[in-house]
Amino acid sequence: MSLAIPNGLDNTVEQPGERAPLVLGDTTYHDITEAVCQVAERKPSTSWVIGFLISFALLQWLGICILYLIYTGVGVWGNRSPVFWGWPIVNFVFWVGIGHAGTLISAILFLFRQEWRTSINRAAEAMTIFAVVCAGTFPGIHVGRAWLAFWLAPYPSLNLWMWPQFRSPLLWDVFAVSTYGTVSLLFWYMGMVPDLATFRDRSTNKWRRMAYGMLSLGWSGSSRHWMRYEKAYALLAAFAAPLVLSVHTIVSFDFAVSQVPGWHTTIFPPYFVAGAIFSGFAMVLTLMIPARKMLGLEKLITIRHLDNMCKIILATGSIVGLAYGTEFFIAWYGQVQEEKFAFTNRAFGPYWWAYWTMVTCNVISPQLFWFKKLRTTPWMIVSVCIFVNIGMWFERFVIVVTSLSRDYLPSAWAYFSPTWVDWSMLIGSFGLFFTLFLLFCRLMPVINMAETKATLAKQYHVSNDGDH
Amino acid sequence: MLRVSQEQETTGGSQTFYNCELMSENNEKKVHGVVAEYTSVDTLLAACRRVRDAGYEKTDAFTPFPVHGIDKALGIKPTVLPWIVLGAGVTGTATALVMQVWMNAYDYPYIISGKPFLSLPAFMPVAFELTVLFASFGAFFGMWALNGLPRFSNPVFTDPRFDRVTDDRFFLYIDSKDGQFDRGGVEKLLGDTETDYVQTVVDDDSSDKVPKPFFMIWGLVAALSVIPLLIVLKMRVSHSSQPRFHVFYDMDFSPSKDAQQYSTLFRDGRAMRPDVPGTVARGEMQADLDFMTGIDMNALSVIDRPRADRLVRSFNPLYQAEAESAQESKSQDVTQAEKADEGSDSDGDKSGADADKGDSDKPDAEADAKPSVMDTTPWLSSNPLVLDEKVLANGRKNFGIYCSVCHGMNGSGNGLVNVRAQKILAQSWIPPSSLHQETLYADKYPDGKLFSTISNGIRKMPGYSGQIKTRDRWAIVAYVRALQLSQNASIDQISEAQRETILSEQSEIQKALKEKADADAKAAQEKEEKEEKEEKEEKEEKEAKDSA
């Protein structure tokens, strides 16, 4: 695969005194509509069908594994004393982290008026929701009696005669993740309504028109509606920004509030949030680069977008690297015997292979993004991002498993080994994620058309006059 | 105006201005307003300003994306949405705090990880999450409500060209409800702006066209979704003589058992599991039997081979299987006396208590004329530990913990338990021995025997092998020897330098004690006198009062 960037599509060069265009070519509003709508309107491509069939098969396999688990009991996992958290929690933290990039792009970059977000935010938000679906599955089935998972909710039960325990981070987690899922869904759906109206107005099929008509709630594009809509969007962004920080902070409390060596550290909240954004951006790029190629969206998702996201990966990757170093420093500086042991054990104990995989993937590989050539070559970006995703999964594995497998009681130490159900569920969760994502690509507007058109309008204005 | 008519002709001329009016009168289609189409933001904004300056108020623009500056151009007032969101957010915070405080501090308080029932810091995360959740609901639903959506039937949708409002066209609309609405004037005003298309908006009848299967499917889904709820509701209010249905019976009623209970899970019916034959539990391997028993095992095997074998077996479970078969064949040979004696030798054997019962009745008398096993046993004569300060300190610590409560800190047999027992159990209490009797000195009571007594107990004293580690029991033996020495040593056994300091210290202490005793006696006398005096004074006062 060559490095060819089609003529006129290189907007990564900084021109002093003018802004680099975010929509390339001689594009009109109608071109944007066409480019986005054709994705959903034409017949599915062979690669989509193959991808969907594979993902759907994996999803079925996940479903079978879950039924097997519920019918047999959690013993089918590799979770044994002393590692009771094992892979399900590793997968939970991994997927929650993946979701964070979507909210970051849609909310925090929106509040900072980073307009380059417009053509990637929709897909990233969708990714957030699908990642939260994957994440929510794992604690749901990890509670042991999955059919009683609703006991987590504070409802007046006639059987229990008791209330949940609000002084535990595990319950905070229930509230944080469910709030996060709900608000992300509202945010995503609200952002899609004007674009769903575009789908409605373009559809020729009666049923299709009705379905999109229902989903778009009768959106007419009225200026008054737009004004309230923008206000609501800004407010939701303002809520989602601290929310996304709070979610992974609370996820890190699950660990940090306990007393297990290697978990009981105050660095966890910022360290987890940085790691979440890091892994999330890597996942966005892993998905978007093939998608933009397959869906023909190169003029809208430009090399500049990829370049910017790579810079964020570089920054957050460096934060994560710094956090790893700080953990070791504090373990030594704190002079707590168990802490010192926990970290020595991570790097040189029986799980050394996991630790060094993590360091290689998370600390070393993103440093390659110092080179512009790597930041602007799609296949190289994808390679690095896949490494980052692997590394971030291993980070959660290292945190969960190494600390639990060797804590205060040496007589209880044991080596964790996953079972085939653990493997199946990890792979199956990717099936769930990709099934949802591929359906989204087919049925929903993958790019925020309205916002991209607004960006284009601004581009016109800048080139014409500075009237508004 | 010219362009308008051209446009109307090119679209087929079916909808001229007058036709529209006729149609609206004949078919009772109400005219809602007039709409004009633009191709760019700039032309739309120019038209908006023109319409606003002409004094129209009930106007609206329809655009494919939010156009900035249009609110000013049209004169749109800011929205109240932020206030709704604020209210929702505050409600969220209040709901979360009230819920948590009520649930965890009042309705169902229980202690967890030492936190107070009303633990505000711990309630903050959920309060934050619910604030965000409620505020987001406020923003989302508030926005749709203020916008009057969902609204599936909208008059502007009747115009087929209006479909492009979500693509690349901009529309300006003047409502017929406007005070100065006049169709001709509006048409003219809009026609003068940069537009290709002006059209009247008439009633929308599209809601009649919703296909019937849609309603049928919707109704069916709604009806089906109610059924589970109804079943749950019926179960809630009705009574049944049938036992509850358990999806996973063994998870609702776990077959786990407590110690000593009968269990159906195992063939032998025991809930507690014995060691697997041929294995030794961690930390239970006891190789050095001299050290474990206080007996010279080599000597014992010469004197009394069967007893030595029994001891080996009882200490080393690896010989368990062998021991069982041996016991079966030899059971006739083992006399009752031997069986009873076994207890006092072996660490774990409960029969030791029975063996000592005979002694406890008459503590000082010899039970039999026949020499006791206790006397014939070849006890270790010296402590197997290498004695140093550390061992003695350890012995002192353990003596203080386990022995001193009865035997007293100095071993004289007057510990706190004894003091108390003398008061409340004077009749039945057998006082603990003083460790300073001559019969307990090392020449008559070897170290091994003392160790065995500590391990297995004697008379009322229970065995301590289960509580004190073997090494620590030996340390206690060493410390007891030191105690005995401390009470019976003569001053000549001490080096001269120490002797002098001890003597001077002793005299000082005695002097101080005497002074203190004198002072106390004096003080007591003074106090007594004072009290007597006071009493007298009081009496006198009383008498004086009475007489007065």
Image (cartoon, coloured by chain):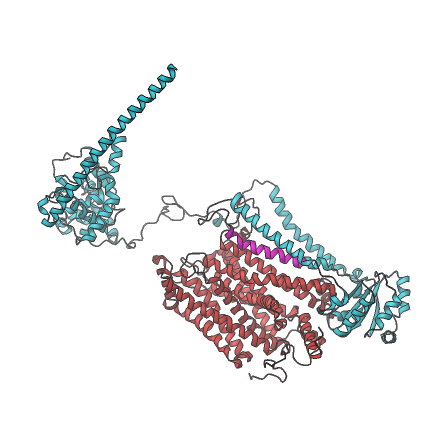
Chain A shade: red
Q: Quadrant of the C terminus of chain B?
A: top left
- Seen from the viewer's position, the closer of residues B98 and B154 is B98
Q: Residue B128 sits in which quadrant? A: bottom right
Across and down, in percent, residue A45 comes to 63, 75
Q: Quadrant of the N terminus of chain B?
A: bottom right
Q: Residue A301 sits in which quadrant? A: bottom right
Q: Which residues are magenta?
A: B120-141
Count of marks placed on residues = 0
- Indicate yes or no whether the magenta region holds residue B47: no
Instruction: Specify the farthest residue to the left.
Output: B492
Q: Is residue B4 above or below residue B204?
A: below
Q: Is residue B139 above or below residue B372?
A: below
Chain B shade: cyan
Can residue B331 be seen? no
Across and down, in percent, residue B524 comes to 25, 30
Can residue A375 be seen? yes
Q: Is residue A5 above or below residue A75?
A: below
- Indicate yes or no whether the magenta region holds residue B138: yes
- Seen from the viewer's position, the closer of residues B503 and A350 is B503
Q: Which residue sits at x=23%, y=49%?
A: B314
Say left or right for A216 vs A400.
right
Across and down, in percent, residue B46 comes to 78, 72
Across and down, in percent, residue A84 comes to 44, 58
- Seen from the viewer's position, the closer of residues B119 and A121 is B119
Which secondary structure type mostly characterizes the magenta part of the structure? helix
